[in-house]
Amino acid sequence: MKKIIVTLFLITIIFTGYSQEFNKDKKLTRILFIMDASLSMNERWEGMRKFDKARELMLELQDSLSNIQYEENLQVALRVYGHQSHTPPRDCKDSRLEAGFRYENIEYIKEVLMNIVPKGTTPIAYSLEQAAHDFSDCDDCRNIMILITDGLERCDGDPCAVSVALQKKGVVLKPYIVGVDLQVEIADILDCMGNYYNASNANEFKQAMNTIVAQITNMTSIQVNLLDTDGKPTETNVVMSFHDNFSNDIRYSYMHTFNKKGEPDTVYLDMLSVYNLKVHTVPPVYLDSIKLDDTKHNIISVPAPQGELLVNIKGNNPENKKIKCIVRKSGLLNTVHILDADKKQKYLTGLYDLEVLTMPRTYFNAVKVNQSRITIIDIEEPGDVIINFKNPSFGTLINEHGKILTNLYDFTPDNTHYRFRLQPGYYRIVYREQRQTSSMNTGEIKFRVHEGKTIVHNL
């Protein structure tokens, strides 16, 4: 009998644990409700005080959130303003976090709401500023504010400026504002703070809250077409990063691919952001201010035509692979990419200037990259040159191209043995031993480097 009781007890614990296990596959979503409990919330609305009716509808919403809390990996908190001090006089710091973020605090929030009495002023901007501290640090959380109010700022603050600042800092995504029985001109003012919903009656209030929760918990499908020069979505295998338009925080990163039908694959984003898209081609392509429509499958088209470029160092010497190439857009100074020799790399179609870091450097201007083709740049194999100084010396290695002399390397007395990989061509070394004090003791040798050959000079 004792074993049976213990077994039943363990089963109860196990199933209780499973019932409270949140969805770890979803980011933690934190919703902060900011509730207006100012004196004006005592006015009549739908046959009741505004606050009583709003509270009644809020209690219904909390029950709904309780049912999806673990499934959606959701935490809820409550901040209230205008409920601690009577007005007049105005207390413009009358705002307090009444319930912090936890998984199992909805019943407590409902209890708090039942004990709130509207009596103060309306410090919206101050409440938003303080609300920023209600969210503890979390690099992978979706922070959302839902403000429920029946009036405007009464404490000379600027709620719109505060809201924008919080979004740019990445503290919260674009806030939601639900206006309780507001006049149209007041509603227009609040619209600047975020996603505004005007509730002239209880049904509109409930509809607004349901819409907000649906947007918070639902994902919207999006397909990104990467277009070639013919305007067809044939490009793929590129990283796409979706950034929040306000804060530039990275919300999602995906590797573009095709589905089984040979079409650009579908990814899912939430509705809480306006997005800036960066397609990580070389150079990257951007598309800003993407607004999603949750009523349809969103298709975004981005021109991203690509071809391939290969800098081919002739010969089989493994050292060839260590040579780099600086790639710039033709006629521009900014570096687009550093390319490894003997590695095919995709670039957007167009003209590029190449600076290959051979010794001496090799330049190619206005190299054309064509759609879906490989542009190959062949470079002669370097030769190996070994220089041995008998005594410590000062000197310079010079490349000779016709009448043009270009310094390549300065020798110092600290070393007497050197090895270089030089491009085929003509060179000279001008030097003087450290112990010699006259310029007349200068020595000079001239030599030619052949492709893939090794030469040794003992000086």
Image (cartoon, helix red, strand yellow):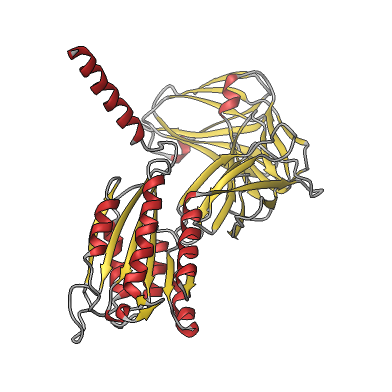
Above or below: residue 252 compared with residue 311:
below
Q: Position of residue 291 (x, y in %)?
A: 59, 60
Residue 381 in view (yes/no): yes
Residue in view at x 54 percent, y 27 percent: 420
In the rendered image, which quarter contains the N terminus?
A: top left
Q: Position of residue 400 (x, y in %)?
A: 64, 38
Residue 375 in the figure: left or right of residue 181: right
Residue in view at x 50 percent, y 37 percent: 409
Residue 273 in the figure: left or right of residue 256: left
Q: Nearer the viewer, residue 61 or 378?
A: 61
Q: Nearer the viewer, residue 144 or 53?
A: 53
Q: Position of residue 205 (x, y in %)?
A: 45, 68
Residue 212 in the figure: left or right of residue 230: left
Q: Position of residue 349 (x, y in %)?
A: 73, 46
Q: Residue furthest front?
A: 1
Total numbered circles: 0
Residue 196 in view (yes/no): no
Q: Residue furthest bottom?
A: 88
Q: Nearer the viewer, residue 22 or 56?
A: 56
Residue in view at x 40 percent, y 24 percent: 391
Residue in view at x 39 percent, y 27 percent: 415
Above or below: residue 425 compared with residue 458:
below
Above or below: residue 29 compared with residue 289:
above
